Every structure is written in C-alpha cells, then in structure tokens.
Amino acid sequence: MPKIIIGVMGASSHATPIEIQTAYALGQEIAKAGWVVLSGGRNLGVMDAVSRGAKQAGGLTIGILPHQNTVMSDAIDIPIITDMGNARNNINVLSSQAVIACGMGVGTASEVALALKANKPVILLTDDAVSQAFFRRWGGAQLSLVQTVEDAMKATRNILKCPI
C-alpha cells in the first residue's frame, strides 16, 4: 500500500520565527501519524523546519529540489532534483495527497493555486486574513482554514478519512 504523502509549503528565507516553529511541530505530528513529509527540500525556512521536525519524530522526508546545486536540508531522506526551478511547485502539489501551507509568500501562493487547480485538498495554516480571503474565494470545499497544528492535523485526517 502506498504511503500517504503530505506536502508542506511555506516561505524560505522570509519565514518568520513563528512559522518555523509551527512547521517544526507540524513535521513532528505528520511523522507521528505515519505519513511522509514532502517539501521543497532546501535548508531554509519552512522547508527545513518541517523536515527537521519529521526526522526528529522518526519520519520519512522527501525534498523536491529546484536545481542540482541547491543546498539541501540535512533532514531530507529522498532528494528529487528537478532542475526546473519554480516549476517544481507543480511536482510538489501533484505528488501530495494533501497540501498544507504554513504561512504565506509568493512561492507558497503559487503552490496553493496549483493545488486548487489540480483539485487537491489544501489546508491554510495561517492567520493572514488577506490570504485567507483570496483563497476562500477560489478554494470552495477543497480549502480548510486553520490556525493551529492540531487543527491542521484534524483537517488532514478528515480529508484523508483517517481516524483521529
């Protein structure tokens, strides 16, 4: 049976300390649920934090890397080098059963939009009202708005129809 892959997207160099802390905790919880963490794989921001959190909890991590010379997070188990730059964002979302956006930035917004376009379930883990309003308009039933890791995990379990 294939493993469940949860894509976690978020800011890299512009991630706030709270987003990094949240991503780390999210990675831990995803790993504890027995799911695989997929991220952009770099050693920055949300990508690094979610991967480190998952590794700390004994989880498996996949990094979809933009280029051959990308500095990868030490917490990535399976690096996939695309040499596609930002076009790899589509691989991120299409390879995930659910996408969790931890915070928001331009790259994250593109991943959320691609996920919605591909009819993937998206969970926005942010208190950014502008992002919430924008994606609520386009997301419909595919979109869940949450503000805590616990709520993100509950929404993911509901999406995947997993027991709590």
Image: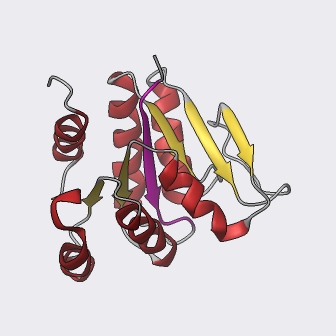
Q: In which quarter of the image is the N terminus?
A: top left
Residue drawn at point x = 45 percent, y = 47 percent: 7
Res. 143 visible in picture? no
Q: Which residue lies furthest to the right in this view?
A: 69
Q: Position of residue 103 (x, y in %)?
A: 35, 65
Residue 122 in which image quadrant: bottom left
Q: Position of residue 58 (x, y in %)?
A: 49, 20
Q: Is residue 95 left or right of residue 71?
A: left
Residue 126 in which image quadrant: bottom left
- The relative height of residue 113 versus residue 143 in the rendered view (above or below) is below
Magenta highlight on residue 7: yes
Q: What stretch is highlighted in magenta?
A: 3-12
- The relative height of residue 28 versus residue 58 in the rendered view (above or below) is below
- The relative height of residue 3 versus residue 92 in the rendered view (above or below) is above
Residue drawn at point x = 57 percent, y = 62 percent: 89
Res. 24 visible in picture? yes
Q: In this view, does 67 lie to the left or right of 116?
A: right
